[in-house]
């Protein structure tokens, strides 16, 4: 990797392909999700080592509630286990942890550990880890609009900045790079507004196979992009 070229400040990752990873091996989908959860820990470490400052991981979408109940329960349980296991280490590493999404729909036990993790790490600033759970980009925009309306704002004074400030991650620069694993090439309702000018990178690796090499390739590709933002 060219360390002199700019490393993305904020990377978003759509962690896709757990089920296919498992099916390809004749394993139940649950095994793919378990392996996928392990990869999260390594990815946070690697991203921080490579000089990335913020990582937003899509762990469970609003639409994923439509999956079979046992798969939904497993995914949410894995998120809870991850947090319980990693909270102290994240805090020691000076990582600020946050969940974005409709937290009120999550199981109470998960909400409790999320609150604890967010409170404990609120003043940390070496690295920003955001986990999107029960999240969708459209939900995010709707909740922002609801809050703006509730503030009694005059419609004529609504600005892009105002909307941005009411969205999730309003205090983190928009993602420079958006990665999706598993070969699918779509956004699937991830950070819609915030990804307006993100560079998109799709890789064939299934999420459980994602590793330092894959992340380095994505960053190297990003470093060769020419971000124009509408200019010439
Ligand atoms: C990603 O893997 C995990 C979530 C979306 C929650 P999938 O479960 O979507 O795996 P595939 O896409 O079916 O292989
Ligand atoms: C997107 O993956 C959501 C997450 C990675 C959490 P999906 O597997 O749910 O997306 P689609 O259904 O293939 O678009
Ligand atoms: Mg999928």
Image: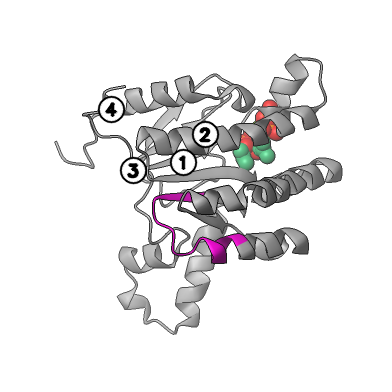
Comes first in the chain, label 3 or label 4: 3
**Crowd around label 4: few <14 · some 14–19 · many ≥20 (10 Å):** some
Relative placement, left or right, of 167 versus 52 is: right
Task: Kindly tell me whether mark 4's CB lies below 8 Å from ligand 2.
Answer: no
Disc 2 and disc 3: Cα gap in Å? 15 Å
* Residue with the most extreme bottom position: 152
- The mark that comes first in sequence, 2 or 4, is 2
Label 2 SS: helix
Checking the image for residue 9, the label placed there is 3
Instruction: Check the picture and name the quadrant holding the N terminus.
Output: top left
State left or right for residue 114 relative to residue 74: left
First-in-chain label (2 vs 3): 3
Give the residue number, with chain letter if any, for mark 4.
223
Q: Nearer the viewer, residue 206 or 164?
A: 206
| Residue at the (40%, 32%) spot, across then down | 200
Front-most of residues 193 and 13: 13
Q: What residue is shown at x 54% (from left), y 19% (from top)?
A: 204
Q: Which residue is mark 2?
A: 43
* The disc label shown at residue 12, or none: 1
Residue drawn at 81 percent across, 15 percent down: 26
Between the C-alphas of marks 4 and 1, the distance is 16 Å
- Range covered by the magenta-colored residues: 117-130
């Amino acid at each position: 990797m060219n360390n002199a070229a700019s490393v993305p400040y904020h990377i978003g990752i759509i962690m896709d392909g757990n089920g296919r990873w498992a099916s390809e091996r004749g394993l139940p989908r649950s095994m793919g999700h378990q392996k996928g959860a392990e990869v999260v820990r390594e990815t946070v470490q690697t991203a921080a080592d490579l000089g990335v400052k913020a990582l937003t991981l899509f762990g469970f979408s609003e639409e994923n509630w439509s999956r079979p109940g046992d798969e939904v329960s497993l995914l949410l349980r894995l998120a809870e286990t991850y947090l319980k296991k990693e909270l102290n280490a994240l805090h020691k590493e000076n990582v600020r942890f946050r969940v974005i999404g409709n937290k009120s729909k999550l199981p109470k036990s998960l909400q409790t550990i999320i609150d604890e993790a967010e409170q404990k790490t609120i003043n940390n600033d070496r690295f920003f880890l955001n986990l999107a759970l029960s999240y969708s980009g459209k939900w995010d925009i709707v909740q922002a609009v609801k809050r703006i309306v509730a503030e009694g704002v005059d419609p004529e004074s609504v600005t892009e900045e105002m909307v941005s400030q009411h969205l999730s991650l309003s205090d983190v620069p928009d993602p420079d790079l958006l990665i999706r694993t598993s070969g699918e090439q779509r956004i699937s309702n991830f950070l819609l507004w915030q990804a307006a000018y993100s560079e998109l990178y799709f890789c064939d690796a299934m999420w459980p196979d994602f590793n330092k090499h894959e992340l380095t390739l994505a960053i190297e590709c990003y470093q060769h992009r020419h971000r124009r933002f509408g200019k010439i």
